Image (tube, rainbow, N blue to C red):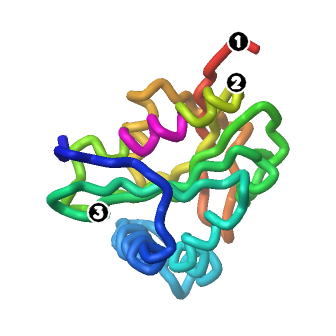
């Protein structure tokens, strides 16, 4: 566990740092598309802070007193803004989580779980009955985290992004 971990919205002064961390994390994943293969995706990552400008979207960061910024995630309170392929943007009474990243030097310390739990709480606070996210085979650490937190595979949310398979997950918060 990272001690003194604070989860909060990203500050404008951290936009570049978070964008660079996201590009570093995603580009280092074995089997994940490169910047050359999917330049638009990486453009989104490097400019991740701009997503915080939308009132229904929160870019959250995990900040440790001893390590600084150690991770980030994007929470969508309105699925029409989720920005994925497939049917996820049509889901109602749902929140979304995208682009979770943890600094490799802080993996295994609860950062990803803390960021995900914060997003789940935001969904509960909005009265949503589910949380939706996507991941890939290249992101097995995240995949396992989500399953261990109660998310279930939802093949109805799967899609292909420029030939790269993306897998949907859903966490039901209520029976409603």
Q: Is residue 72 left or right of residue 53?
A: left
Instruction: Please report the residue visible at 42 percent of the width from the left and 45 percent of the height from the top.
Output: 115
Pointer 2 and pointer 1: residues touching (CB < 8 Å)?
A: yes
Neighbor class of circle 2 (other Cα within 10 Å; few <14, some 14-19, many 20+) is: some
Residue at the location (44% across, 77% down)?
Answer: 13
Is residue 59 rendered to the left or right of residue 66? right
Dominant secondary structure (helix, strand or loop) of the stretch shown in magenta: helix
**Secondary structure found at label 2:** loop
Disc 3 element: loop
Mark 1 or mark 3: whose residue is earlier in sequence: 3
Q: Nearer the viewer, residue 152 or 6?
A: 6
Relative to 96, 19 lies left or right: left
In the picture, the disc for residue 175 is: 1
Q: Give the percent coordinates (x, y) of residue 137.
A: 46, 52
Q: Position of residue 76 (x, y in %)?
A: 66, 49
The boundaries of the magenta stretch are 114-120
Q: Is residue 112 above or below residue 175?
A: below
Residue 37 in percent (x, y) is at 57, 82
Q: CA distance from mark 2 to mark 1?
A: 7 Å
Numbered mark located on residue 129 in the image: 2
Q: Position of residue 5 (x, y in %)?
A: 27, 47
Image quarter of the C terminus: top right
At 80% from the left and 46% from the top, the residue drawn is 87
Question: Disc 3 designates what residue?
Answer: 103
């Amino acid at each position: 566990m990272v001690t003194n971990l604070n989860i909060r919205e990203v500050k404008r002064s951290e936009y570049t740092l978070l964008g660079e961390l996201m590009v570093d994390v995603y580009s280092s994943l074995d089997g994940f598309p490169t910047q050359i293969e999917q330049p638009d995706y990486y453009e989104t990552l490097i400019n991740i802070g701009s997503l915080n400008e939308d009132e229904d979207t929160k870019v959250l960061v995990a900040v440790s007193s001893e390590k600084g910024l150690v991770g980030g995630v994007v929470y969508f309170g309105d699925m029409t803004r989720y920005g994925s392929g497939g049917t996820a943007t049509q889901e109602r009474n749902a929140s979304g989580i995208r682009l979770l990243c943890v600094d490799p030097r802080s993996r295994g310390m609860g950062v990803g779980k803390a960021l995900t739990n914060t997003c789940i709480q935001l969904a509960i606070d909005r009265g949503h009955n589910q949380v939706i996210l996507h991941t890939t085979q290249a992101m097995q650490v995240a995949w396992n985290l989500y399953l261990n937190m109660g998310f279930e595979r939802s093949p109805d949310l799967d899609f292909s992004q420029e030939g790269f398979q993306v897998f949907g997950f859903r966490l039901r918060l209520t029976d409603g």
